[in-house]
Image (cartoon, rainbow, N blue to C red):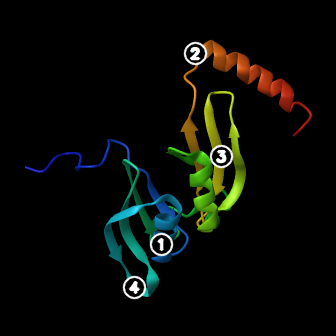
């Protein structure tokens, strides 16, 4: 009998729609070290479906093939409604690798008040990836205090 949740997957698995086709797989391999575990190409460079292993997580991807009522890539919508968060061993190294592969810088890496080294990039389809390395274990109180201080420092800068 088949497992209800396939091996290597978790209960929640992102399934993102791409603005493009097969070339997107090359971007994810180069930018994030993705391993393509399943690939179903379609006609005219379309990517019907692929499954990527990035670190210890799985991500499903595919070209927009669903027509007007189906899901769209962020570039088609003009915005993204979420981040895809990627924990890595070295934020700066992973960030640079993503940028060299063609990602657009949204927020350069910085040490954040919640204890992570954190940055953001946008992939060619418009998905925003936050890239992070956890550096400090902090209490909720410490995060709250640092967050308040950070907000005060940010006043007038936006």
Q: Position of residue 25 (x, y in %)?
A: 45, 70
Of marks 2 and 4, which one's residue comes earlier in the chain? 4
Of marks 4 and 3, which one's residue comes earlier in the chain? 4
Gap between marks 2 and 3 measured at Cα: 22 Å
In the picture of the structure, the residue carrying the numbered disc 2 is: 139
Gap between marks 2 and 1 measured at Cα: 40 Å
Q: Position of residue 144 (x, y in %)?
A: 68, 18
Q: Is residue 36 above or below residue 44?
A: above
In the picture of the structure, the residue carrying the numbered disc 3 is: 119
Gap between marks 4 and 1 measured at Cα: 18 Å
Please tell me whether mark 2 or mark 4 is closer to you in this view.
2
Pointer 2 and pointer 4: residues touching (CB < 8 Å)? no
Of marks 3 and 1, which one's residue comes earlier in the chain? 1
In the picture of the structure, the residue carrying the numbered disc 1 is: 26
Which secondary structure lies at badge 3?
strand
Gap between marks 4 and 3 measured at Cα: 36 Å
Of marks 2 and 1, which one's residue comes earlier in the chain? 1
Of marks 2 and 3, which one's residue comes earlier in the chain? 3
The reply, left or right, for residue 111 in relation to residue 35 is right
Circle 1 crowding by C-alpha within 10 Å: few under 14, some 14–19, many from 20: some
Circle 3 crowding by C-alpha within 10 Å: few under 14, some 14–19, many from 20: many
Residue 69 in sight from this viewpoint: no
**Quadrant in the picture for residue 37:** bottom left
């Amino acid at each position: 009998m088949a497992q209800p949740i396939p091996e290597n997957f978790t209960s929640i698995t992102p399934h993102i729609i791409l603005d493009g086709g097969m070339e997107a797989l090359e971007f994810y391999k180069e930018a994030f070290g993705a391993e393509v575990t399943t690939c179903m190409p379609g006609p005219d460079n379309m990517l019907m479906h692929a499954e990527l292993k990035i670190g210890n997580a799985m991500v499903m991807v595919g070209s927009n093939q669903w027509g007007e009522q189906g899901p769209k890539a962020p570039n088609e919508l003009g915005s993204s409604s979420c981040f895809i968060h990627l924990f890595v061993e070295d934020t700066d190294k992973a960030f640079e690798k993503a940028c060299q592969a063609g990602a657009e810088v949204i927020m350069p890496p910085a040490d954040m008040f919640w204890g992570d080294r954190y940055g953001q990039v946008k992939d060619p389809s418009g998905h925003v990836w936050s890239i992070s390395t956890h550096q400090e274990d902090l209490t909720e109180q410490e995060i709250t205090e640092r967050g308040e201080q950070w907000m005060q420092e940010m006043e007038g800068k936006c």
